[in-house]
Amino acid sequence: MTGRRLLRHLGLAVAYLAVVEGMLRWGFGLGDPPLARLDPATEYELVGPAEYRRWGNRIAINADGLRMPPLAAIPAPDERRVLLVGDSVIYGNHFLDQSQTIAIRMADRLAAMPRLAGCRTPTLPVAVSSWGPVNQAAFLAREGSFGAQAAGIVVSAHDLFDVPRAGAGILPYRTGPPPGALGDVVLMAWERRPWRPAGPPPAPLDERAAQSLAALDRIVAQLRDDGIEPVLFYHPTLTERAGPERTEATVFRNWAGRAAVAFADLGAVPVTTADYLDDIHPGPSGADLLATALADRLGPGLPGCPP
């Protein structure tokens, strides 16, 4: 092969890769995933302030590591803040745009309530994918309750056993940017390789459940010290909705009774499979329905704003 032909082939290869890179980046929204940093207390946290694009959706993380707009340290007189503690369901995963997340929709619902006329009602999603009560308790213990006046803690069956486990698998986020959209695809394939290390075995279920319930105890104690009476919301999967109550749901219900915490079953919210992206994560319409239910329960606990 002559040098000229080789250069032509190299040029075509570069052009082809550039086209593929552009299609993956602007057609599929790859190449700019949200980033996390490791933390000895919370296990990992989102990196902000920063704005990302993932699968074509806007993901904005503020300086506190929350998926919401910037937040002043002290609430303004016309602010009525609500904490919404959870995991990927509340975070919104990467298939919901920022504007479609439960927290953003809930803030809109609260602001539309006549008794909160004239109030600003930011809803603070203390929520990161795969965070369980242990992660959430550590974050709140360090950051405080952000001046909130109401709080909802949203759990699902898996949260009873979801505790930090050193060296287990991969994080649900990257700790550094990928080398372009093509590199993003390669990393996704590598992260999902069937032969990846499994990590150390998890602790027995009863030990993990005890850790999660103890973490809920700490969250509730902290919120009550700050004058907030939280509500525990149980979020069932679509599969659960079609069957009897799971043991984990009963455990959370019983814990709420012992802790004198109000319990609400989000299974009472009428949804269809069209409202969900998978068995547990709501799509835009499902997020709307859940946001309305959460606002209807937590909104009455907020004081109105002076005219």
Image (spheres, rainbow, N blue to C red):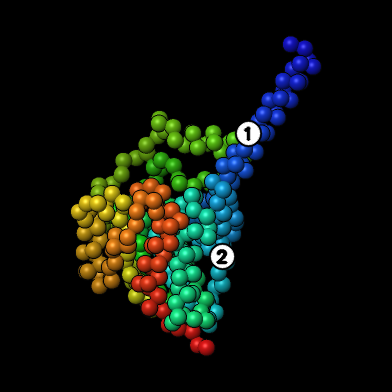
Say which residue label 2 marks: 69
Q: Residue furthest toward the bottom? A: 307
Sequence-wise first label, 2 or 1:
1
Is residue 198 shown above or below 73? Answer: above
Label 2, label 1: how many angstroms apart (C-alpha)? 33 Å
Say which residue label 1 marks: 20
Circles 2 and 1: CB distance less than 8 Å? no
Horizontally, residue 15 falls left or right of residue 210, namely: right
Name the residue at 47% across, 59% down: 101
| 111 or 79, nearer to the observer | 111
How crowded is the residue under tag 1: few (<14 C-alpha within 10 Å), some, or many (20+)?
Answer: some
Horizontally, residue 85 falls left or right of residue 111, namely: left
Name the residue at 21% across, 64% down: 254
Q: From the image, state whether disc 2 or disc 1 is nearer to you.
A: 1
Q: Residue furthest toward the right? A: 4
- In the image, what residue type sits under mark 1? Val
Q: Which mark is residue 75?
A: none
Helix, strand or loop for disc 2: loop
Q: Position of residue 273 (x, y in %)?
A: 35, 50
Name the residue at 37% across, 39% down: 199
Horizontally, residue 251 falls left or right of residue 287, namely: left
Quadrant showing the N terminus: top right
Name the residue at 39% across, 51% down: 274
Helix, strand or loop for disc 1: helix
Horizontally, residue 286 falls left or right of residue 206, namely: right
